[in-house]
Image (cartoon, coloured by chain):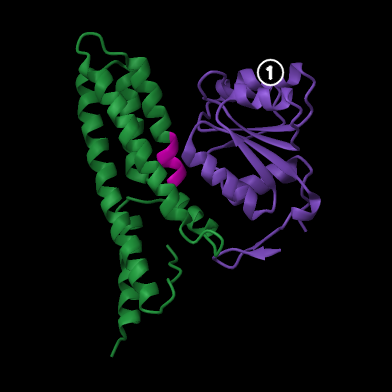
Amino acid sequence: MDTLIAQLQRQFRDYTISLYHQGFLDDQFTELKKLQDECSPDFVAEVVTLFFEDCEKLISNMARALDQTGNVDFKLVGSSVHQLKGSSSSVGAKRVKGLCITLKECCDTQNYEGCVRCLQQVDIEYKTLKAKLQDLFNLEQQIVQAGGRIPQVDI
Amino acid sequence: MTRDQVGEELPNLAESKLTALVVDDSFVNQTIHQKLLNRLGIKNDVVTNGKEAVDVYCSGGNYDLILMDMDMPIMNGIQATKRLREMGIESKIAGVTTRANEGEKKEFMEAGLNDFQEKPLTISKLLSILHKLNFYVQT
């Protein structure tokens, strides 16, 4: 019979794999995990928190710019989405990065409806990722509290 | 050498007393780049745009290596690199950016870079920079 720790570890392993297979995360997230150590055991959580703060700020900037109907500053939208693409790439947020690329294209062609639609998708996507990573970190905490080690997951 | 979480051996360059300056306006990238440098034992500081980097040098600061982002407010990486070279600064400067088209890369290199890497930075990309700039010899 599986112990609680073994069950939690298996859940953690399966959930992590699913996040990669469903395209939420890519190799760069693995690179972040490699940097986590005893000196900074919460490194990944800290970095993704900064990323989600970026998402909130930049999406808000872009929404405000797009609200100026008839006088949209596409340069501002473009610069904000470039920043967001950069930070999503740095944390391995694959789907968010992909949507940023699409949004940048809409911006470059001054496709207003495309920008609005895409920005809504970016907003949904980052919030979805935020919830999923919170679940992942909660699983890690449960494993540690149960006295187990967080398994290394090979993707 | 130290081992990271997946058991790979990483060089510890603390004895070489290398210093680095991270120039990037993104808190996400600042945090990652500083962590990468810390893992390799390289003491480092961070500034948030090219003007701050120039100001640090004007105040007498000096670093072996500068990791220079391209797109930053107030003074971007191209302007800052040009300015530092005009000041006679010989620190090694590695451009680190998500912009990878050949024209933009050429412009950045011509500003005075010693090396260029596409973001996101990883341990292996940083080691590649250090190796290329003769700070680290792979054994």
Chief SS of the magenta region: helix
Query: Against A89, is A36 above or below?
Result: below
Give the residue at x 33% y 40%.
A96
Give the residue at x 44% y 48%.
A47
Dot 1 lies on which element?
A: helix
Q: Which range of residues does the magenta coloring cover?
A: A86-91
Q: x and y percent of residue A90 in the render? A: 46, 43
In this structure image, what is the colour of chain B?
purple
Q: x and y percent of residue B4 in the render? A: 59, 63
Give the residue at x 79% y 55%.
B15
Query: Against B8, is A118 above or below?
Result: above
Instruction: Give whichever of B98, A76 is nearer the camera.
Output: A76
What count of labels does the image hold? 1
Query: Against B138, is A154 above or below?
Result: below
Going by the image, does B53 lie left or right of A28? right
Q: Is residue A15 magenta?
A: no
Seen as rendered, the residue at the extreme bottom is A1
Q: x and y percent of residue A129 in the render? A: 29, 49
Image quarter for residue A62? top left
In this structure image, what is the colour of chain A?
green
Going by the image, does A17 lie left or right of B103? left
Q: Quadrant of the N terminus of chain B?
A: bottom right
Going by the image, does A28 lie left or right of A84? right
Seen as rendered, the residue at the extreme front is B59
Report the residue marked by disc 1. B82
Q: Is residue A88 magenta?
A: yes
Give the residue at x 32% y 55%.
A133
Query: Against B47, is A71 above or below?
Result: above
Residue type, mark 1 in image: Lys
